Amino acid sequence: MAAFLSVPSKFSPEVDLVRPLKNFIQNTYSSEGERDDYAQQLGELTKLRTSAVCRKLDKHANSLDTLTRYYDQLEAIDGKLPICEGQISVNFSWIDAFDKGGLFTGGRKQTMPTAAFERACTLFNIGAMNSQIGSLQNPEDDDGLKIAAKHFQQAAGIFNHLKDTIVSIVQNIRTYDLHPDCLEALSDIMLAQAQESFMRKARQDNMKNNVIAKLSHTACDLYAEALKHCQVPHVKEVIPKEWIPTLAGKQAYMQCLAEFYQSMVCKDKKSYGEEIARLAHALDLCKAATTRAGQTMNFKDILGKVQRALESAKKDNDFIYHDVVPKAEGLSAIGSAPLAKPTEIPRPMNAKFQDMFEKLIPLSVHNSMSAFESRKVGIVSREIGKLRENTQLMNSVLSSLNLPASIEDLGGDAVPASLLEKSREIQAKGGLQAIDKLFADLPELLQRNTEILDESFRQLDEEAKSDQEMRERFKERWSRLPSQQLTSTLRTEGGKYRAILNNATEADGKVREKYNSSRDHIALLSNPEGQLAAALPPSSAGAALAKTPVVQELRDLMKKVEAIKNEREVMESEIKNTSCDMRTKFLSALAADGVINEEAISNQNLDAMYGPLIHQVGDSLRRQEGLLNSVQDANTRFSAAKQTNTSAQQREDVQRNLAGAYDNYMELTANLQEGTKFYNDLTQLLVKFQCKVSDLCFARRTEKEELLRDLTQSIANQPSGPPPTTPPHHTQVPPARPPTLPQRSQQPSAAASSAPPASSAPPPGSAPPPSSAPPASAPGYYPPYGGQAPPPNAGMPYQNPPPRGQAPGGYPTQQYQPMPSYAPYGGYAPMPAYNPYGNPPPQAQGPPGPYPQQQYQYPPQQGYPQQQYGQQQPAYNPYQQPPPRS
């Protein structure tokens, strides 16, 4: 019998995995403090892919180990490094396993930028390698049959898994080896061969006849199912041509074995008539198997056994038992014993697998942590905003009441202590120079971010324009995903960044407007104490109120105000610094449930983290409301008791403006520092965004070049126009047949009359004169074209022999009718008359003209009509049909 069938492997060219994966790791995981760029691991992954799918592997267990390690690594990074459109752009090209292409044209291939397609093709190769290893096992050895059955069942399980999942992975299948019908056929073939291995093992172990019969019958059914699926038109066109005869022969052979061993069961039961019927049926099946398989398999061994058993059974039945022999259609069905089953794909497939990117968290965990951080930032910003907003409200109220400066400046001859402290704080922070520098840095930061965003959009627009040009040029043949669909997410993200920059620009304008209104008073607070005291108008109207109860009450209230401010600084620090290890919690949830309910987990932990702090913020706001009411009431009584004059009023106005300028300075400084930090943080986000855009555009440009090359090649391979109805004679090759003598003509033809004079012909009985041209068999030699330039394709040797029934060059075969003489093609040199009774031409030169050398056999002269040897013969026509044999 023939060896087991094996599936060829797919092939993929090398790709660059380091650059896109490294950029994604740096842009995505750097926010979590991940400093390792995994350059070494990415290099190892690229080498592993090259070894696994970019080179021809030996049919050995080591090759299977390499393939499974690469597949397991693809499975491991699936949740961490999303290789797909819009994320990590890597174009994987795979060539059809069965269509390897010709000498000048590559095989049919498909390119997709998804890791799912890469995993599916790698899994196909694992199934193919299992089939190849199984087919190399020795079918006469027990261990070989066990190994073969194991690998065939694994291959069947892989192809069956791909059949069920490939449609969800590849919507537009261009390579027929991944078509569900083809995968189903491959799975059936592998399963049938596994069942055959079990049957052979049972025969070698001399198991019971009924067991072997059932195993053979089940193998027959499986081969019949595989044969049916292989005869689907688009599957039949793909698989090797010898597969269908092999499957058909094996299907009949397995049924033959089933009937043969079942006949032995009948013999043991003394059912001699049924024994003979089954043996006769087995003999017919064996002959059918021989006819179906042709030269691919040999069934002489089993054929001899069945014939001898049938002769012996008939002899015994005729002389002894005389049992009635039933018809084959009336025989009872043989049972089944399906031992072969598709093996489920293990996880991982390689027992020694180690994840190269074990430290990288799954992307779902990373996204959950990002969402948690967004929720956390929202709570922090809201609560700190409440504290700062109410603190500013309290400061503005106190500034409008000139507190605490009014109760500290009762003498009217010195700078109030609170005002001096505010002046020192402003001077410590750098005064006007510091805030002017912060204002000067903002436009530069804004311009830098704007330029990065503009460049990103420029790349997207350029890619979209290029894609549209190719789509208008090639129409429906430009089959890749349109740029509008692919870049919509990136454009949406870029639009958000654009809106953020616009809002930041408006906020910068408001901050500058506020700064301009307070700049003079801030400059005054930036001066030394002497200059500040000289700037205050003198007044002594409130000296008598220094020890009154209302002043003491205001001083106590001011202490409470300072206490609230200090508490809020502590609360703000606690709100900012509160943290929680959410990575462990999200990983635990993913391991337990397979998914992460981020919203529920985040809200639960945020409530536990910020619940007490939120309560403290609310209590502080309530106490502030009561405190301000008390301050306003006490200040009303203080103002009524205080004797005022114009100078005192002017002094209070200046102090009030200075206190307001101090508050504005602190607010503006905080805003500008946050703005600078905001622009720097935004720069990092925009750089990551630009990297994603650049990676996408690079991948699209590579995909465009590859698709453009394929389309250009396919267009170039198409014929430029319809072939001519009559091909030139110089492109026709006469059919290979023994040389025949031309029919003699009774009258000279027009061609004969146009022949050269008799003096130019060789004398009768002599060989033709030697030609100065190279022999006709020399490549590239063609007769002259009458002094004119040859046709465009003249002189080009054929690359491949023409198929049967078709002339070279793609022209249809034409039947040439016998003609009495040969009229030379326009431009050919006339050929001398051919003398069939002369000496044969020299073997070194061959017959003259553009025809290959042949060994001429000349029949005896008696078989031809009498003629004069000196008579001129008609011109030789090499395209003339041979005369019918008498």
Image (cartoon, helix red, strand yellow):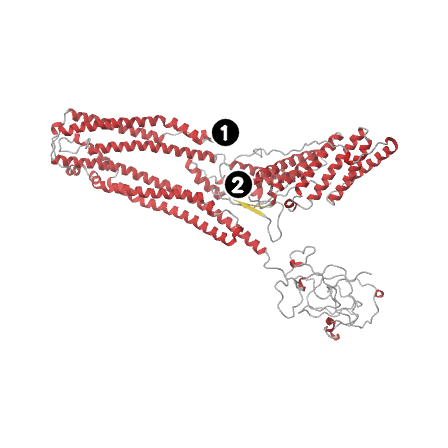
Q: Residue at x 24, y 31 (%)?
A: 394
The residue type indicated by label 1 comes to Asp
Q: Position of residue 373 (x, y in %)?
A: 40, 33
Q: Quadrant of the C terminus?
A: bottom right
- Disc number at residue 115? 2
Looking at the image, which residue is at 50% across and 46% down?
Answer: 481
Amino acid under disc 2 = Ala
Q: Is any atom of residue 468 visible in this view? A: yes
Q: Is residue 718 above or below residue 783?
A: above
Q: Residue at x 72, y 73 (%)?
A: 754
Residue 161: x %, y % from top left: 59, 37
Measured along the vertical axis of the image, is residue 617 above or below residue 69? above
Report helix, strand or loop for mark 1. Answer: helix
Where does residue 597 sit, x and y in percent of width and height? 46, 31
Q: Is residue 312 left or right of residue 39?
A: right
Asked if residue 565 is positioned above or below residue 42 in the image, the reply reads above
On the image, which quarter does residue 229 sit in?
top right
Along the line of sight, the residue nearer the viewer: 226 or 808: 226
Q: Is residue 66 something one can see in this rendering? A: no
Residue 495 vertical position relative to residue 277 in the rendered view, above or below: below
Which residue was labeled with disc 1? Answer: 593
Q: Tell me if mark 1 has few (under 14), some (14-19) or many (20+) residues whose alpha carbon lies within 10 angstroms of its own.
A: few
